[in-house]
Each structure stands twice: as C-alpha cells, then as structure tokens.
Amino acid sequence: MGQLALSGVKKRFNKFEVIHGIDLDIRDGEFVVFVGPSGCGKSTLLRMICGLEEITEGECTIDGQRVNDLPPVKRGIAMVFQSYALYPHMSVFENIAFPLRVERLPEAEIKDRVMRAARVLQLESRLQQKPGNLSGGQRQRVAIGRAIVREPSIFLFDEPLSNLDAALRAEMRIELTALHQKLKATMIYVTHDQVEAMTMADRIVVLDGGNISQVGAPLELYHKPDNLFVAGFIGNPRMNFIPGTCTAVGPEGATVHLVTGGTITVPVEAPLGLRGTQITLGIRPEHLSQTSGDVSIEVVPTVVERLGVNTVAYAELEHVGTVSALLPGASEVAPEVPATLSFVAADCHLFDAEGTALPR
Ligand code: ATP
C-alpha cells in the first residue's frame, strides 16, 4: 500500500511561510510529478513528506495513518536524491545493501534483496565494482537500488536525473517508467524538466509560490490549463500570449480584438461582464502555421532553429514580446524575412484579466 494524503500542509521557516496550505491525495501506485519554477517549494514539500523537514501546520497521512511525528525511517518511504551520495570505498553490492545493514537484517535476506534489486536495475554484473568505475547513469541506478531494497511503499525522487547528460536522461526516464510499471509502487518525483513531467507522470502537480496552481493528467494540463501560469509553464516552446480586448460575448463565444490587429471569436463560455475587459489570448507555437487560419499575425523572425523534424521561429512583437512558432519540417521561414502566421479559433485559449482560463 502507498496511499498518501496532505491536508492543509503549511511550512514556515522562522516566520516566513513558503508552503501555504497544500491539499493533495495521491493514490496507491500512482506516479505523481511536482513541477514549478525554482523556489516554488517542490523540495520542501518532498522533504516534509519523508520527514526530513517538520510540517508546520496541517497533516500528512500514509495509508490513513498520521505520520507528522514519525521519524523518516518509520514512514515506509525511500528517497533518491540528485547527488547519488554513494560511498566511494564500498562496492556496488555494499552500497545497495547499506540501509539493510543499518537495519541489521540477516545476511541471507540482505543478499536476496540486493540481488533482486540488481536484477531489476540490470546491475548484476557490476556488484563487485566501486562507484568510481561506473557511468553517471549506472551510479544513479545504484542509488535507486539502495531505495528499492528497503521495499518502501512510496518512493520520492528529488531531481534524480539532473546531473546526467541529455542522452542519458532520456534513457533513465524510460528506465524509471519501466521500473514504476514493475514495482507498482507510489512514486513522487520532483523535476524542472517538463519532458520528464509530461512523459512519466500519471498526474502532474504544478506548484507556484507555495500553492498548487493545478493538478491533472499531463494532456489535461496541456489542453485545458486553468490559468496563465500553467498555460505558460506546460508546453515547450511556451504558449504565446497576445493581449486583446473582448468586444462581444455571445453563444458562439467571446470575440477578441487583438493588439496585433484582427478579430477572432473563440468558442468559450464567457460571462456577459467580459465585454469591454482586457483579456489574453493564448496560442501554442505548434498551432501557428503558414497556411490560412481565422486570424493572422505579421512577424519578422529574429532567430530560426532548424531541428530537422520541425523548425522553430522566434520574433519580437510590440505589446506582445517574444512569439514563437513551431512549424513542420524544414519550413522556408528565414531570419529577417517577413512571414505571416495564422491560427484558428478552436486552438485558442482565453484568459480573463485575473489570468483565469475561460471554460470551453
Ligand atoms: P528548486 O527547484 O530551485 O530546488 P524548489 O521549488 O525545490 O526550488 P524549495 O527548495 O522547496 O524550492 O524552496 C522553497 C522556498 O523555501 C524558497 O523560497 C527557499 O528559499 C525557502 N527555503 C527552503 N529551505 C529553507 C530553509 N532551510 N530555511 C529558510 N528558507 C528555506
């Protein structure tokens, strides 16, 4: 079992509150990813869950039992950090066995558990080596092995892949997803990397300044962000935001006059009071195209990145800032050459003056 619930969880360092009352239910076996900008409280939340940091206010329960006052080792949780924290003088076997030795388990059981973990992580042939002889990815697997042998019901990962290069990160991402499927344990994973969040998570928790901004399945956050913050955070390159004024509201949606020129009616449920207010239209870079659409913007790209499978063009627009377009294949856009980018109403998101998304 590995069901975890946070209710009204707050954290204050001295008088300074950094976590403002988190409510979250995590199901047994779920893979939940915490994302958010630097300083939003991801690590603090993780450290409160595992007991390395005291919970100032509120409650953390695991399988229905309040754990606020339980020491880390009694919570049935194992944590894997970004720094692998392996002992360089010990073999891989002894590094993995370490927490079991601390628990003074019988030798036969230690051997059995280490061998099982090594099999899952494909480290069997490395057990007698020292960490210094391993690659970064193998070292991280040893650190994960040390968590696995404790047979926790909940795994916590704090940016475990951020010391690895891009290729190895991609490889380890797939390995961790496979590991989750094998172990069926609850996993809570903190990352800056939204590709990790999108690909590994059953649900993503987006944190902003010590509050939850939105919780949902990756594609739910991509397609239906609740607010400007989540819309700008999920998706790469980030969503373009074009300010405008709502000029009409009707059964077909809200009509917006954009600062870039042009008018578009977006199919959202808009209250009558929206008329005359300043609103923001959100359009993802992948929804801008060089074919015709419901409305267009004129740009002069400053930078064009050709990635083979697609091309990303960046331009600066007055009152908007940087606009990016993700165009298919080897698009003919070029720096300093004017281009027309169009989009359709069905792909647009609208946000009111408070930054709240208008429902579709
Ligand atoms: P990052 O992605 O940069 O690791 P994070 O989202 O994990 O950031 P935290 O490390 O949880 O953020 O920090 C949240 C806030 O709490 C920050 O404002 C940080 O300065 C503050 N903070 C964290 N630990 C302490 C501490 N021991 N004493 C005082 N303030 C702290």
Image (cartoon, rainbow, N blue to C red):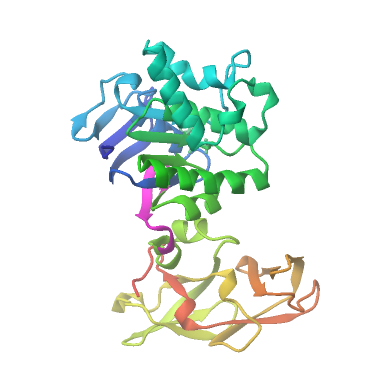
On-image quarter of the C terminus: bottom left
Q: Quadrant of residue 248?
A: bottom left
Q: Going 28% across and 37% down the picture, which residue do you hit?
A: 2
Q: Which residues are magenta?
A: 206-219
Q: Position of residue 196 (x, y in %)?
A: 52, 49
Residue 213 in magenta? yes
**Residue 80 shows in the view:** no
On-image quarter of the N terminus: top left
Q: Position of residue 95 (x, y in %)?
A: 53, 19
In the rendered structure, the answer to whether residue 282 lies left or right of residue 77 reads right
In the rendered structure, the answer to whether residue 224 lies left or right of residue 9 reads right
Q: Quadrant of residue 220?
A: bottom left
Q: Position of residue 114 (x, y in %)?
A: 46, 24
Taking depth in this image into account, of 42 and 269 the one nearest to the observer is: 42
Q: Is residue 94 above or below residue 118?
A: above
Q: Is residue 296 above or below residue 7?
A: below
Q: Position of residue 205 (x, y in %)?
A: 39, 49
Residue 212 in magenta? yes
In the rendered structure, the answer to whether residue 208 lies left or right of residue 133 reads left
In the rendered structure, the answer to whether residue 236 lies left or right of residue 150 reads right
What main secondary structure does the magenta stretch of the protein show? strand
Q: Going 54% across and 69% down the picture, which residue do you hit?
A: 284
Taking depth in this image into account, of 189 and 124 the one nearest to the observer is: 124
